[in-house]
Amino acid sequence: FEKLSAAVWRVEDKVPNMPLRRVMTVASRADGGLVIHNAICLPDAMMAELEAWGPIRYIVVPNGMHRLDAHAWKARFPNAKVLCPSGARKKAEECVGIDGVYVDCPADPLVSLHMLDGMNLAEGYMQIVEREGTTLVFNDAVFNMPHLGGVQGFVLKHLTQSSGGPKTSRLARFLLFKDKTAFAAQLRRLAATPNLKRVIVSHHQTIEGDCKSVLEQIAASLA
């Protein structure tokens, strides 16, 4: 685990049969319950460490494609509620029972789930507000992936346009975006989040430092 703050843990793993890295984010609510965003099966020792931190209350399937390990997590934590964006529910339910959508997540002063504009309710983001700063967690709407070598790296760089730093990928624009202008406007609003400390994405590297400028640059690229 990469323990980014008192309320945010992150873990990275490979995607089976693909060159991508996937990221699971764990957020601790004010009541001590944990929210698992983009669940990844972990070794027993890591699961034990996680369970010692707090009870697993919510398992978030962040879109209809990010559902690989959700069923295994629900089997291990049957009392946890599985949530997904409302527009992704049909696809997510092909792999795991869904208990509710983002608006069904009870209000909490630290951790909240929100929808993204311009994506036909297919994807959202998680926000964690702490005294030392705010963390935003995106899924496929924002990538931060370095260029890779070989044929697969060529495909990711030139065809899907997924690699090469913070951006929206061509694949995401094709599969998720319905109104890129609306999404860009929301990115600019999120860039203005007070005390924005980091942006976690579900593929590859966390965005840290001047997150405001990075999100504004991504928004500008959608013009």
Image: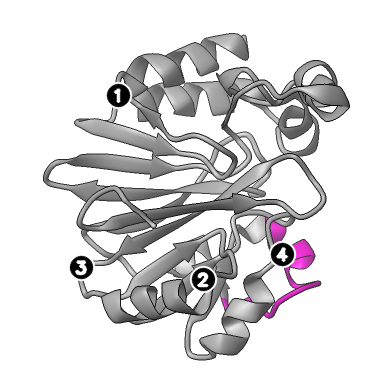
| Residue 140, picture quadrant | top right
Q: What residue is rendered at 70% in x and 65% in y?
A: 89
Q: Tell me if residue 89 is in the magenta stretch.
A: yes
Q: Which label's residue is closer to the chain start, 3 or 1?
A: 3
Q: What residue is rendered at 60% in x and 20% in y?
A: 181
Give how far apart the Cα atoms at labels 2 and 1 are: 28 Å
Location of mark 2 (residue): 59
Q: Which label's residue is closer to the chain start, 3 or 2?
A: 3
Question: What secondary structure is found at the residue carrying circle 1?
Answer: loop
Amino acid of disc 3: Ala
Horizontal side of 124 relative to 133 (left or right) equals: right
Q: Tell me if residue 94 is in the magenta stretch.
A: yes
Q: Are marks 3 and 1 in contact (CB under 8 Å)?
A: no
Location of mark 1 (residue): 192
Query: Residue 61, relative to residue 45: is it above or below?
Result: above
Q: Which label's residue is closer to the chain start, 1 or 4?
A: 4
Q: Nearer the viewer, mark 3 or mark 1?
A: 3
Q: Residues within 10 Å of mark 3 (few under 14, many from 20)?
A: few
Span highlighted in magenta in the image: 88-99
Residue 6 location (% of width, % of height): 20, 57
Q: Nearer the viewer, mark 3 or mark 4?
A: 4
Give how far apart the Cα atoms at labels 3 and 4 are: 28 Å
Amino acid of disc 4: Leu
Location of mark 3 (residue): 30
Q: What residue is rendered at 79% in x and 45% in y?
A: 18
Give how far apart the Cα atoms at labels 1 and 4 are: 33 Å
Q: Which label's residue is closer to the chain start, 2 or 4?
A: 2
Give how far apart the Cα atoms at labels 2 and 4 are: 12 Å
Q: Nearer the viewer, mark 2 or mark 4?
A: 4
Location of mark 4 (residue): 68
Question: What secondary structure is found at the residue carrying circle 2?
Answer: strand
Amino acid of disc 1: Ala
